[in-house]
Amino acid sequence: MRNNIPTAALSEFVNEVAENPEEGMMSYGIEIDWESGTRSCTQTKPMLVGPHKVSRSFSWKVDEPRQLMGNNHGPNPQELLLSGLGSCMMVAFIAGATAEGIQLESVKIDFDGELDLRGFMGLNTNSTVGFPKINYKIHAAGDATPEQFEELHRKAVAHSPNAQSFINPVELNGEMISVQVSD
Amino acid sequence: MSISNIRGDAHSAGPSLTTGKWLNKLERKRQTGPLFGTAHAHELGMSTRAVHAGTNDDPRTGAVGTPIYQTSTFVLNDDQYDSVEGGYARDRFIYTRYGNPSQWAVQEKLAALEGAESAIVFSSGMAAITATVLAMVDKGAHVVAASDLYGGTYNLFNQEFPTLGMSATLVDSYDLEAIEAAIQPNTQLLYFEVITNPVLKVVDIPRLADMAERHNIRLVVDSTFAPPPVMRPLEHGVDLVIHSASKYLNGHSDLIAGVTAGPRKLIDQIWPRLLNYGGSLDPHACFLLERGLKTLPIRMRAHEASATALAEFLESHPNVERVLYPMLPSHPDHALAKKLMDMGTGNVTFFVKGGDEAALRLLDHLKLPKQATSLGGVESLISLPFNSSQATMTSRQRAEIGIDPGCVRLSVGIEDADDLIADFGQALEHIAPMKEAKYA
Ligand SMILES: Cc1ncc(COP(=O)(O)O)c(C=O)c1O
């Protein structure tokens, strides 16, 4: 086991999906319930790995700091966005390193992002609502050359589903299901 | 590296590591096994497979049959170190808990008999069941299982599951609608016994397999009561088949063992649980099990012949209320049994007139069958559910799962039918309540 990834099983899975693409179809879902103020709770739904159901019993709270009218009871949506981006790049980086036989000692990804809330507030400026850019640094130690690490970095971003969802336009299809309550 | 340096499955090579390349260049594909010698032929007859599959003569001396590799550990070379690093240690000999040629021989034989790609043997049926079930579920998972499971399996779902933050709904294995209704969003597994104990219900495995597929969940069955000459559940669409090999597979009531067989993909997911939970089978027990398996088909024919003759005799006896033997037309599941089972087994359940008191008297007067739980041995074994396997239940609870008073659980061995019939004949004469009055 290199980097605690069973390389043989990884290889077998890749070859299985090549022959039977259905096994590579992942389906995910979460549910977010508003709790109070800016705080909500996210719950994972069962996921499908190929045609096989996996129980996912995880939940977490998301909140804004008090300065943004919240109670600071959990990470905020921007931090979770960066976490989802970075931990996906991490999986790609580790899997790619393992497939190449690179033994890793440590890997850390450090993210920073700035956004201008005037966009959220609708104040009349030219600023974007979302992050105009995100900066990160990958700190890695292992038995690869700096050139190999650079190449691995490039490939990890190129194959990371979340990084690619950031870089490319994603169709966001929403539907409003409402109930008017009168008392 | 030359083949002779490979201590394990010579057909298994490591994943090609490709500097500068991505995952799509990984070459290792999943294959059947692990195999010590050449692949067994699934198209051979059941008895031929039982004798030859997996069994490897000693290459150094020519001694016929698999030697007993009574060792805990193996001398390591570069290839074995590579296998640990590359994540294919299941295909090499490293340490006996991980794998041992004596285990591989039995595993290959069992895989050939079940028509499976791969199998793992365990130190008991329960070790096979716990490792298999826990490999197929995740945090927060739910399982739908039969309400009349073997007691140890029931305890896994009833006692261990809540501690692990998982849950199970137990449903009558006849009631397919209730089974389907019990499936929840977090259900990952259907778990059933193909023939239940003691009333020998034959469960509709093909329909359960269809249900599991429609719901994207796995179907795992315990086929202890129907060894491969009788039924091969993988052919009916189940994902994994488990046995307590302590019963028919070994057949001599002289060891405790278990096995799980199925696709290599799933067996490889169970293997790390074997390593973590530790229920590996000792090489000497493997030798006994391998030896027992060689006569499995021929033993099953003897079990069936004596059980059929005895069941027919019991059915015609005035002191017997009712006989349950799936291959007799009187069994409620006879039609399904004919469809799913290639032959009968040694398990006969019957109800004597006069209730549990009469059943106790019957046991006291029998000379051949041993009063013992378990089943599938060459010697007939007999017990009463009310004071053994279902002793913790109330009589009402027992009645709910079909265990009416006077229920006798019999595992017919391979003794001559005439001797068994004579023995039961004389013992049944003693059970009538009015005879008791004479001595009162
Ligand atoms: C149907 C069934 N499954 C599992 C087991 C457990 O097997 P073992 O005793 O080998 O652990 C038994 C044993 O009685 C059994 O009858």
Image: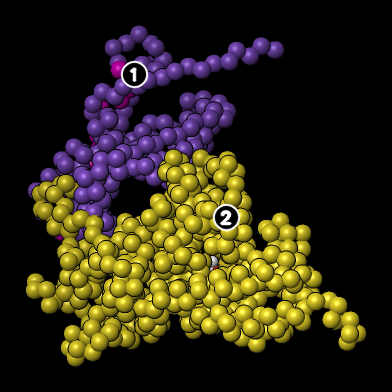
Chain colours: A purple, B yellow
Q: Quadrant of the N terminus of chain B?
A: bottom left
Query: Which amino acid lies under the numbered mark 1 shown in the image of this protein?
Result: Val
Q: Quadrant of the C terminus of chain B?
A: bottom right
Residue at horizontal 37 percent and vertical 16 percent from the top? A118
Q: Is residue B377 above or below residue B182?
A: below
Residue at horizontal 24 percent and vertical 57 percent from the top? B30
Nearer to me, B81 or B113: B113
Left or right relative to B338: residue A12: left
Q: Is residue A182 above or below residue A88?
A: above
Image depth: mark 1 or mark 2 in front: 2
Relative image position of residue B105 (x, y in whole percent): 30, 76
**Residue B166 shows up from this direction:** no
Alpha-carbon span between mark 1 and mark 2: 68 Å
Relative image position of residue B345 (x, y in whole percent): 51, 69
Tell me, yes or no, whether the highlighted magenta stretch contains residue A141.
yes
Q: Quadrant of residue A141?
A: bottom left
Pointer 1 local density, CA inside 10 Å: few below 14, some 14–19, many at least 20? some
Q: Which residues are magenta?
A: A128-143
Q: Is residue A148 above or below residue B59?
A: above
Tell me, yes or no, whether the highlighted magenta stretch contains residue B339.
no
Left or right relative to B382: residue B250: left
**Residue B314 shows up from this direction:** yes
Pointer 2 local density, CA inside 10 Å: few below 14, some 14–19, many at least 20? many
Disc 1 marks which residue? A129
Residue at horizontal 66 percent and vertical 80 percent from the top? B424
Outermost residue on the top side: it is: A124
Q: Give the secondary structure at mark 1.
A: loop
Left or right relative to B116: residue A176: right
Disc 2 marks which residue? B333
Relative image position of residue B108 (x, y in whole percent): 30, 70
Nearer to me, B99 or B290: B290
Query: Which amino acid lies under the numbered mark 2 shown in the image of this protein?
Result: Asp
